[in-house]
Amino acid sequence: MILMKNIIREGHPTLETIAKEVRLPLSSGDKKLLKEMLEFVMNSQDEEMVEKYGLRPAVGIAAPQVGITKRICVVYITDFDGTQYSYALVNPVLKAKSKEIIYVPGGEGCLSVDRETEGITPRYKSVTFEALSYDLASGQVIPVELTLEGYVGIVFQH
């Protein structure tokens, strides 16, 4: 189980290292990592788990944040219209972006940053990613193309 003590903090060299592409088929270690990362994000949104394990709320996490330089990330978020996004992604690539820029008015947080940050982070209003999506239930890896806007798009860009 991933806990806050497993999240590396700003200044750690891994966070500034270009993550490596993941080879297929996924190794058992990669599958376990994806599962544990998704569990962490889901647990971080459960008040009882937050209190029990001292978790900080999250909507996503990337492998480098747990010290692994691989192109793996997960996102678990409910958009303002109630749409649930739950993805365990491998080798995501930004394929298209809008010219229009948006931002989260209150600023963005990050699990790897323990201090309050000021200012805003400009993000593209609309983005399209191509990735491999790992389905934890079936164990299948499926190519996906995701076009995302607004807050969910910001989360995927972070």
Image (cartoon, helix red, strand yellow):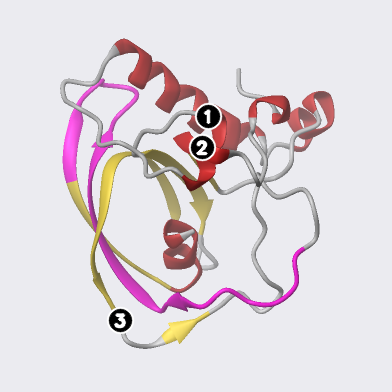
Give the image quarter of residue 100.
bottom left
Circle 1 SS class: loop
Q: Is residue 140 magenta?
A: yes
Question: Of circles 3 and 2, which is in front?
Answer: 2
Tell me the number on the disc at residue 46.
none
The answer to whether the residue labelled 3 contacts the one labelled 1, judged by CB atoms less than 8 Å apart, is no
The amino acid type found where label 2 is placed reads Thr
x then y, percent, for residue 115: 80, 54
The amino acid type found where label 1 is placed reads Gly
Farthest residue in the bottom direction? 100
Question: Local crowd at mark 3 within 10 Å, few (<14), some, or many (≥20)?
Answer: few
Question: Local crowd at mark 1 within 10 Å, few (<14), some, or many (≥20)?
Answer: some
The answer to whether the residue labelled 1 contacts the one labelled 2, judged by CB atoms less than 8 Å apart, is yes
Out of 8 and 47, give the one closest to the viewer.
Answer: 8
Question: Of circles 1 and 2, which is in front?
Answer: 2
Out of 112 and 61, give the one closest to the viewer.
Answer: 112
Q: Is residue 67 magenta?
A: no
Gap in angstroms between the C-alphas marked 1 and 2: 6 Å
Q: What residue is shown with label 2?
A: 14
Please provide the residue range marked out in magenta: 117-143
> Mark 3 vs mark 2: which is more N-terminal?
2
Question: Local crowd at mark 2 within 10 Å, few (<14), some, or many (≥20)?
Answer: some
Out of 33 and 22, give the one closest to the viewer.
Answer: 22
x then y, percent, for residue 158: 49, 58
Tell me the number on the disc at residue 67.
1
Q: Residue at the spot x=49%, y=45% of the render?
A: 76
